[in-house]
Amino acid sequence: MTLEDEVARGVGGMGLTDAGEREGGGAAPSVAGDREMVANSKYSGRVFIKSILGRPDGGVGLIGQKVTVGGWVKTGRVMGKTASAFLEVNDGSWIGNLQVLVDATVATERQLTLTGTSVLVQGKLVEPPEDKKQKVELLVETILHVGTVNAAKYPIAKTKLSLESLRSQLHLRARTNTISAVARIRHALAVATHTFFDRNGFMWVHTPIITTSDCEGAGEMFQVTTLFSETERRDREYAANPPPSQAEVEAAQDVVAEAAEVVKELKAQKKNKKELEPSVQALMKAKEHAAHLEARASLKPGMPRKEGGEVDFGADFFARQAFLTVSGQLQVETYACALSNVYTFGPTFRAENSHTTRHLAEFWMIEPEIAFADLQDDMNCAEDYVRFMCQWLLDHCLEDMKFISSMYDKTAVDRLKLVASTPFVRITYTEAIEILEKVTEKKFENKVEWGIDLASEHERYLTEEIYKKPVIVYNYPKDIKAFYMRLNDDEKTVAAMDVLVPKVGELVGGSQREERQDVLERRLKEMNLPMEPYEWYIDLRRHGTVKHAGFGLGFERMILFATGLENIRDVIPFPRYPGKAEL
Ligand code: 4AD
Ligand code: MG
């Protein structure tokens, strides 16, 4: 079902589900006479603006209908002659604003017209005067709610704000056209992702966010620990209630000795059990007290440490070191080697000190893993998936794409069309190096020679200048790639592939996995990685190994690629990067 079909049927929500379903949030439209009445959104008793303006007729067919609409005022003015208020209202369901007319007899409040004011209004959809750009406007009969704004303090008032300055208003920036369009595109791409994998027989597996293995072996992990807060708590306790002195401990031990002496004497006097009881009790109490003091006397402030002085992670929450995941791949492989086609889609974390426009410390990654598949299958899957997402945006988010394109990158919509319809170029790493070595019209900052890790400038040159479309580079030198990638017969390269796209560079990184136990163990050793943490991973090769392959697609990089926005910090709601973690 296309977007037009959906809105024509009055689906009020994001309208991204398949035909026949109404999960987008719109209640079924009712029919009055031979005319379809616009449907209320199912859970808030008002009509989404998308259900009016998103129709192929721009809302004309709804003229005369009474609706309730809510949203935030984008711009507003009081019209001189009539003193009525003219508002442009947006509720986030659609890029366009609904024009709302409030007659002075209904409300005279100037407050209504201030940018950022929230309104819930009821009225009739009418035909606007001819000079208006929209085909329908709302003539308000009743104002149900007004959430006023403190205009002097509202940080994102009318004037055009740069995306950079909006980054310091994360709590309000979703009210801007750009960030709300990006949010809808992001949502659409998430739905596209689940749709693509579901249709192709993949199961979504939730891999852990807290992990104890470093998938990429690059040591760029954030540690998860309670040792700091625990140590602070114990240090506070220690200061408030210092440990006993040696003299106090010895005094308590003396009391034990004396009490023991008493019991001994009574026993020598052959006293019966009842007569012994009080002295035995006293001895036990003294022992308990002494033991308590002895234990407290050995307390030390600061982190728990082993004899050698290193921090004792055995005392940490998980009784070992734990981290935020850099990739769900290793874990999802365990499910691929049981359920065949799986994928994980979740947040990943990298503690790399990158300040680029392409890196985040917290980003989302989609990682499919396919059993009984090789590098060719892997490349086919990645290519189909990326092209599917491009087509999906054209089918479901065209208005938002057109808006973003008009504002930031005139080529964005055409790029989606091109990518959706053209096969990707595929070249080996060796071929890529040969091509780049021949480039004379550009001087690269990083020297090109076989064995280097391609830098962003090389990747972008290949995809933007040479081929002008997505390029898959495969069979990389083993020394620049992770331990789990399958060693090729030449023993020099691994069955790895990266999908490079214009505007972004690397969008996807993947590989066929090393399924041979002996080779995997050899690779771990060569790369000086410890065997113990990967024992379970080797076990998958020890028991019922199969060839398998997978990849990771950076979700925010996909949004950058689709929208043409320049900075990855603007395509995730709450960006985290060195020095910044707000809200
Ligand atoms: O190439 P990467 O590091 O591959 C892996 O993590 C593999 N375990 C994936 C797999 O085979 N299952 O990362 C995959 C993709 C990159 O191509 C890039 O798009 C994105 O994740 N990415 C980042 N995106 C934003 N910020 C960062 N710091 C990123 N690091 C990687
Ligand atoms: Mg990579």
Image: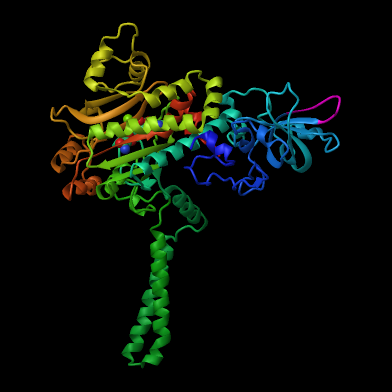
Tell me, yes or no, if residue 111 can be seen here.
yes
Is residue 277 inside the magenta stretch?
Answer: no
As displayed, is residue 554 above or below residue 462? Answer: below
Q: Quadrant of residue 138?
A: top right
Q: Residue at x 40, y 53 (%)?
A: 300
Q: Residue at x 54, y 24 (%)?
A: 402
Q: Looking at the picture, tell me which residue is in the foreground, 247 or 342.
A: 342
Where in the figure is residue 239, as x and y percent of width and height? 50, 54
Q: Quadrant of residue 134?
A: top right
376 vs 263, left or right, is: left
Is residue 82 inside the magenta stretch?
Answer: yes
Q: Looking at the picture, tell me which residue is in the foreground, 63 or 382.
A: 63
Magenta region: 76-84
Where in the figure is residue 269, as x and y percent of width and height? 33, 91
Q: Looking at the picture, tell me which residue is in the foreground, 472 or 273.
A: 472
Q: Residue at x 50, y 46 (%)?
A: 21
Tell me, yes or no, if residue 325 can be seen here.
no
Which image quarter holds the C terminus? top right
As displayed, is residue 431 above or below residue 545? Answer: above
The prevailing secondary structure element of the residues shown in magenta is loop
Q: Residue furthest top?
A: 441
Where does ligand 1 appear, by image quarter? Answer: top left
Where in the figure is residue 419, as x and y percent of width and height? 39, 24
Q: Residue furthest front?
A: 34
The figure's colour scheme reads rainbow
Label tally: 0
Where in the figure is residue 195, as x and y percent of width and height? 41, 41
